């Protein structure tokens, strides 16, 4: 791996623990003002000290995040669709030059395996990796899953492996109870899990703990943190699971203490 790419990656995946807590706040790029993220300027600063990086679009970064922040920026560079239309109709919307200008440590895009535009999104990932490797920029590929698709190890394993084959440096996918270790085993690059829809805090902590146990290097989690009644407690608890391997019970206490 090129020095620059390795160095950027080390800003997200801690060289000390080999793990990462990415805070995903990009949801507005297709769903508009999202519960818990309606006012990013107010909602986000308190969470940043506990995140290893922030997964965000350029618009919210520029308008809502202080440029003096220390949190490394992982930039979402795909979009072009909304919840009102065909979600797989995404393209690359933000240039590599812009990612460099914003001092990003990585770029991310969604890939829609099995959806209407799977071919275009998979090819776009290959092209993004070509551009990113020229400048030493890690690429995170997100396996977007359609509403009517089953999130099982077979599908998640297929989608994750395709992302790695295209050259992604990290893959973000969903956790599945059965055989998640096989998803990890079949993917030669680090895997982080998305949290998905808001679920009870204890269940979200258990999911993060199971994912780490099964080989994930961390989370790129959004709603289960910023939609919690105690978002700071929740990100601290997730951080303790990911980096300190605390039990779910201990993590739940951390959450409760806010
Ligand atoms: C949306 C995304 C989000 O970043 C991802 O879903 C993570 O957030 P959450 O934990 O809320 O699922 O990529 O396409």
Image (cartoon, grey):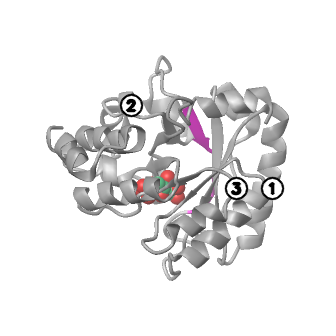
In space, the residues marked 3 and 1 are separated at their CA atoms by 16 Å
The quarter of the image holding the N terminus is top right
Say if residue 31 shows up in the picture.
yes
Decide if ligand 1 comes within 8 Å of the CB at mark 3.
no
Residue 160 locus on image (x, y percent): 65, 64
Instruction: Please tell me whether residue 11 is drawn above or below residue 186 in the rendered image.
Output: above
- Count residues near mark 3 (Cα–Cα under 10 Å), then give few for <14, some for 14-19, many for 20+: some
The quarter of the image holding the C terminus is top left
Helix, strand or loop at label 2? It is helix
Helix, strand or loop at label 3? It is loop
Q: Determine the residue positioned at 63% across, 57% down.
A: 80
Q: Which residue is mark 1?
A: 126
Q: Which residue is mark 2?
A: 48
Q: Earlier in the sequence, mark 3 or mark 1?
A: 1
- Count residues near mark 2 (Cα–Cα under 10 Å), then give few for <14, some for 14-19, many for 20+: some
Q: Determine the residue positioned at 42% across, 50% down.
A: 221
Classify residue 47 as left or right of residue 76: left
* Residue 128 within the magenta-colored segment of the rendering: no
Q: Earlier in the sequence, mark 2 or mark 3?
A: 2
Q: Which residues are magenta?
A: 73-81
Disc 3 versus disc 1: nearer the observer: 3
Q: Determine the residue positioned at 77% across, 71% down.
A: 119
Q: Determine the residue positioned at 68% across, 34% down.
A: 99
Q: Nearer the viewer, residue 182 or 8?
A: 182
Residue 188 shows which numbered tag?
A: 3
Q: Nearer the viewer, residue 180 or 142?
A: 180
In space, the residues marked 2 and 3 are separated at their CA atoms by 29 Å
In space, the residues marked 2 and 1 are separated at their CA atoms by 31 Å
């Amino acid at each position: 791996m090129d020095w620059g790419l390795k160095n950027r990656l080390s800003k997200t995946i801690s060289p000390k623990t080999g793990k990462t807590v990415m805070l995903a706040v990009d949801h507005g790029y297709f769903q508009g003002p999202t519960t818990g993220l309606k006012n990013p300027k107010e909602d986000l600063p308190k969470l940043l000290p506990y995140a290893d990086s922030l997964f965000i679009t350029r618009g919210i970064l520029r308008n809502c995040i202080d440029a003096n922040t220390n949190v490394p920026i992982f930039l979402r560079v795909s979009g072009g669709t909304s919840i009102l239309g065909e979600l797989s109709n995404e393209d690359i919307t933000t240039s590599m030059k812009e990612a460099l200008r914003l001092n990003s440590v990585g770029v991310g895009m969604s890939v829609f395996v099995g959806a209407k535009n799977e071919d275009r999104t998979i090819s776009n990932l290959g092209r993004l990796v070509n551009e990113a490797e020229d400048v030493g920029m890690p690429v995170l590929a997100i396996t977007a899953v359609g509403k009517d698709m089953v999130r099982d190890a077979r599908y998640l394993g297929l989608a994750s492996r395709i992302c790695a084959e295209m050259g992604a440096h990290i893959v973000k996918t969903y956790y599945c109870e059965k055989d998640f270790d096989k998803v990890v085993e079949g993917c030669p690059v680090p895997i982080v899990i998305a949290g998905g829809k808001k679920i009870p805090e204890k269940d979200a902590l258990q999911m993060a703990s199971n994912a780490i146990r099964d080989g994930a290097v961390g989370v790129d989690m959004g709603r289960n943190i910023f939609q919690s009644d105690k978002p700071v407690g929740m990100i601290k608890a997730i951080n303790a699971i990911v980096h300190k391997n605390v039990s779910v019970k201990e993590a739940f206490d951390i959450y409760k203490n806010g």
